[in-house]
Amino acid sequence: MKQKTTGIVLSQREIAPAVFDLWLETALAREARPGQFIGVYPKDRSTLLPRPISICEVREDRKALRIVYRVAGQGTREFSAYREGERVELLGVLGNGFPVEQGKGKRVFLMGGGIGIPPMLELAKALKEQKEEQRDIQKAGQGQGQEQGQGSGEGLGAEKENDNGVISSIMGYRDSQTFLKEDLERYSRVVIATEDGSVGTKGNVMDAIRENGLEADVIFACGPMPMLRAIKAYAAEKGIPAYISLEEHMACGVGACLGCVVKTREKDPHSHVNNARICTDGPVFEAGEVEI
Amino acid sequence: MAEVWNPDLSTEIAGVKFKNPVMTASGTFGSGMEYGEFVDLNRLGAVVTKGVSNMPWPGNPTPRVAEVYGGMLNAIGLQNPGIDVFLERDIPFLKQYDTKIIVNVCGKSVKDYVEVVERLGEESAVALLEINVSCPNVKEGAIAFGQKTDALYEITSELKKHARQPIMMKLSPNVTDIGEMARAAEAAGADALSLINTITGMKIDIHRRKFALANKTGGMSGPAIKPIAVRMVYQAAQAVKIPILGMGGIATAEDAVEFLLAGASAVSVGAMNFVDPYATVEVIDGIEEYMRKYHVGKISDLIGAVR
């Protein structure tokens, strides 16, 4: 259930210029899924509205959330000054996350651009967990009638390597400030593109795919609109689904104000005028469903 | 021994009784479904719905909202699914709750308004109609009826002929003399007034050198507009005898009491729902607390008490 609640800052550090990594202890962590977001309220009452910020990671015990955000204005500037112990008003958990199950048994591209990269981390984690669960199920199936543990040592290592290769995180940065790269490497193979060419492919995430000759069966993406448009076109050309997370100026964050809409191909059941609400019907949509 | 003071929070607008004077400003609360997750809708005096038109309206392009100092601008453009979907989906939803239903009606022509008003006349669960003649974000209709006394008189008297429920004209603050508008609506037979709608504003993004809203202008709401709203409610209350639903920047019970004292019979919480989804209920509890503290017996003791 959605709620407004108080969170407590556990830690915060600047991981790239103007990009902050904030861990919050909050009840919202219990239900948070990859691709969902929270609203963070500034304390300065001249700025009233909650800032929608995507969930980057959920702590193992599901009692804390990590958000990674870029200072973009007055609200986020205020957040960036928070230190351990600061109490923060939060609204959440908002939106529908990525359909993780769509990655089952598939070659997956996680594509993130700039401040669209953070939600890819929890997603990479969930996809890897899903894969491991699947493998355990398969192993259990294969193991029937055999003696337990037989020959499992060697096989596991080789299998793990293959599995890791299947989830490719293709991340686009401005420059060599490749925040969250190490985190993503724990769950996926990471391929980098930078605008200035200082790391990986010079160019954007699409350039990185081509340069490395990568292929996928499904795409999950979050990033600036030109990137999402390119991904939509690429997915259509390849005939594969692409689940993209959209962003728009929001007021309520819960679907009431109709501020953050996106044009949809089909009439959606809520608006009846082909205007889905990014906050509640999204923020993740299959690229073919939305006009971007 | 401490005296137990049990204030009566009920109030009345145009013969309709409300359990308390706290409602939701149209457009900030949908038809209650979204905020029903946060607040018990049974506690509200009424839910005032998002504007509904005779046909589905797509609204404006995005960006539709922008934050400004102490408030926000919106140019949603009255996106709504139309009266058919509204009657099939939203009214049955609201009927489940023990709260009054006020439907906000919008249109591009008098005929459009009449059509919606007549359809709503068949629905006995709808207690009151709020006629939106003041939305600043649509090009045709709406505000065109709310900025000139003769146009307001004409649409009010026409709707009065067709409405089964009492009608409450929602007035625009974007006028020179609110008292004159209030009198025109009253003279045409309006049963009540609600004010203020949002104040037309603009924001420019200096970094991108673009308007913050796709519509260029938008309606300003939020705590920053409250003094203007209180002033207009007071002026309207001085000008007419019909009851007033007051709104504009209400964030707390203290704000709500201010509107009652200025002459409102009830109040709506608008943009603050976005800031605090529990705002409506907190305002209700706070009004009760205020009444206990100052030994106020009933809401009517507060209405227009400051002259």
Image (cartoon, rainbow, N blue to C red):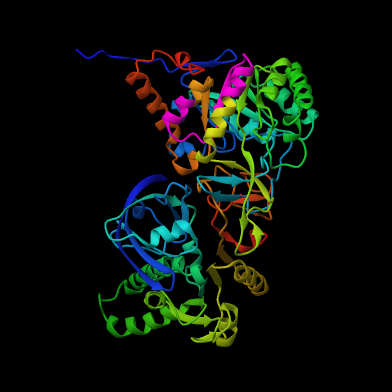
Please determine whether, in this image, residue B106 is positioned above or below residue A10. above
Q: Position of residue B100 (x, y in %)?
A: 53, 22
One can see residue A36 in this view: no
Q: Residue at x 49, y 68 (%)?
A: A115
Q: Residue at x 73, y 23 (%)?
A: B118
Please determine whether, in this image, residue A202 is positioned above or below residue B242. below
Please determine whether, in this image, residue A35 is positioned above or below residue B65. below
A67 vs B260, nearest the viewer? B260
The magenta stretch is B234-258
Asked whether, in this view, residue A116 is left or right of residue B135, the answer is: left
Asked whether, in this view, residue B98 is left or right of residue B139, the answer is: left
Q: Position of residue A112 (x, y in %)?
A: 51, 71
Asked whether, in this view, residue B158 is left or right of residue A162, the answer is: right
One can see residue A165 in this view: yes
Q: How many labels were placed on the picture?
A: 0
- Residue B244 counted in the magenta span: yes
- Residue B66 counted in the magenta span: no
Q: Position of residue B97 (x, y in %)?
A: 49, 26
Task: Locate the N terminus of chain B and report the quarter of the image it occupies.
Answer: top left
Q: Residue at x 61, y 66 (%)?
A: A225
Q: Residue at x 79, y 22 (%)?
A: B154
Q: Position of residue B32 (x, y in %)?
A: 52, 35
* Residue B193 in which image quadrant: top right
A69 vs B54, nearest the viewer? A69
Please determine whether, in this image, residue A144 is positioned above or below residue A250. below
* Residue B264 in which image quadrant: top right
Q: Residue furthest left?
A: B1
